[in-house]
Image (cartoon, rainbow, N blue to C red):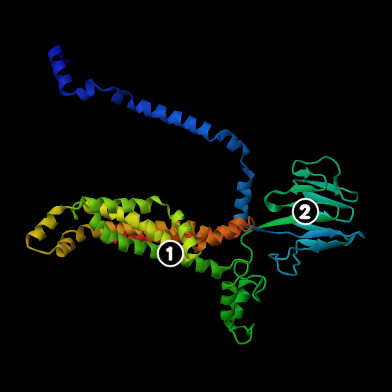
Amino acid sequence: MTVIDANRMHEIEQRYPEYFKRSFKQRFGGLMIVIATLVYALYATWFFDLPKLLADAHWERVGLYLSQWVSYDVQPEFRISDTGEITVKYPRFSPLGDDPHPDWVINNADGSVTASVRGTSRTVTVSSKETVVTAHGISVPVDVSSGAPKVVGPVPAWMTVYDDNVLADLGFAGDVSISVDRVKVRKRFLGWANFVFDTQSPFFDKPASEVISLIVSGPELKPGQSNLSLAFDNIWHNSAWQHGDVWTKLFQTIVMAFLGTLLGALLAFPLAFLAARNITPNKVLNQVLKRFFDFLRSVDMLIWALFLTRAFGPGPLAGSGAIFLTETGTLGKLYSEGLENVDNKPREGIRSTGASTVLTHRYGIIPQIVPVFVSQTLYQWESNVRGATIIGAVGAGGIGLKLWEAMRTNANWENVAYMVLLILIVVFLFDMASNALRHRLMGTKAH
């Protein structure tokens, strides 16, 4: 065992003071950060009143909206006349068309009508005096012969009784609303109704094999127009899903992002050379341009879009202009900082040969910065595809406005899901393309 005397110990302490004489910050810095984070979390909880927000939130709506993204419903309404006759009515724009006769609505011999909400386990039988709801293994009769509907027997947990209405919640399968003169059934189906052909199309409700047969060799359904052309026209002008308008707006969004990013890059590139201290030794010009970039960046793209829609009216021009102004500031800052970090030795070597300023920049600077500039520009372009969707919601055109209109109705969540899915696919494809271009330009292998 080695024994260290006092002198040797003092010498070691002098040589490595960072280990033996640590400051308060070094000893307790980590602990202070943890304490500060906890204090801030408590403050944020109090400031935003998070317990109350969480308690008052309508969490049930989350599942409802998500279910509407991936499903549609059909709503037959059984009307009971004074004579006891039962008629079935459907909403004007029913997914089943103008004259639906679904096989899950059955007219019984005794004059009653039975609707199967989910097979035989959840059904509704409507008669002139009584409506019977079968679900969760029991059948619950509701008397509708008096002034208000009345549940006969105990009320199950999945039923709610109001003054003039009884609501039966049958889960994802749907629900039933019962009053004295009508019973409204909501039956839910997985999928997107009439996504290819709407109810006005001659191809509506035909199996895929029959549609293909009609397109390939069937007689003309519309004189003077081939069935293939008619099918494409019906899909493109689908009244429920509006594929043509959605895809046109999506293309507008892509063009807005491309044009705005391209114009911003073209303007930011020369200005960055004037803003870089090591390229243009003029402090006043450097500072003026850098503050100009800061101004353009500090005003959010959404605010620029609001200004420009007032100036030029709603449309893609305002969106492209908003992206152009924002990208001029963002890319100008990125380009100028990239120029200030280049290696000056190649530039000095070329200048020593008597080359002009333009040639010095061309061969001494450009080869160093092109991969970085292209990488930054591609990333901004990819990001602006998402940004163009947001600014579209304020009137700048593109699919963002279409998305906002669908959300505002609070009834077309499957259309919202369709457009969100398209946006995700476009962003995913752009991300792959920009990554491939960046790796190709920088000479690295994509992973």
Where residue 177 appears, x then y in whole percent?
77, 51
Q: Nearer the viewer, mark 1 or mark 2?
A: 1
Q: CA distance from mark 1 to mark 2?
A: 51 Å
- Is residue 240 positioned above or below 187 on the image? below
In the drawing, does residue 331 fall left or right of residue 236? left
Q: Quadrant of the C terminus?
A: bottom left
Residue 70 visible (yes or no): no
Where residue 246 appears, x then y in whole percent?
54, 66
In the drawing, does residue 417 fall left or right of residue 380? right
In the drawing, does residue 151 fall left or right of residue 237? right
In the foreground, 99 or 56:
56
Residue 381 position by quadrant: bottom left
Q: Quadrant of the N terminus?
A: top left
Q: Residue furthest right?
A: 83
Where residue 37 appears, x then y in whole percent?
42, 31
Please state which amino acid type lies under the numbered disc 1. Met
Residue 256, labelled with which disc?
1
Q: Residue furthest bottom?
A: 224
- Determine whether the residue tagged by mark 2 lies in a helix, strand or loop: strand
In the foreground, 286 or 48:
286
In the foreground, 111 or 371:
371
- Determine whether the residue tagged by mark 1 lies in a helix, strand or loop: helix
Where residue 219 appears, x then y in whole percent?
63, 85
Residue at position x 34%, y 50% in the image = 294
* Label 1 vs 2, first from the N-terminus: 2
**Disc 2: which residue:** 123
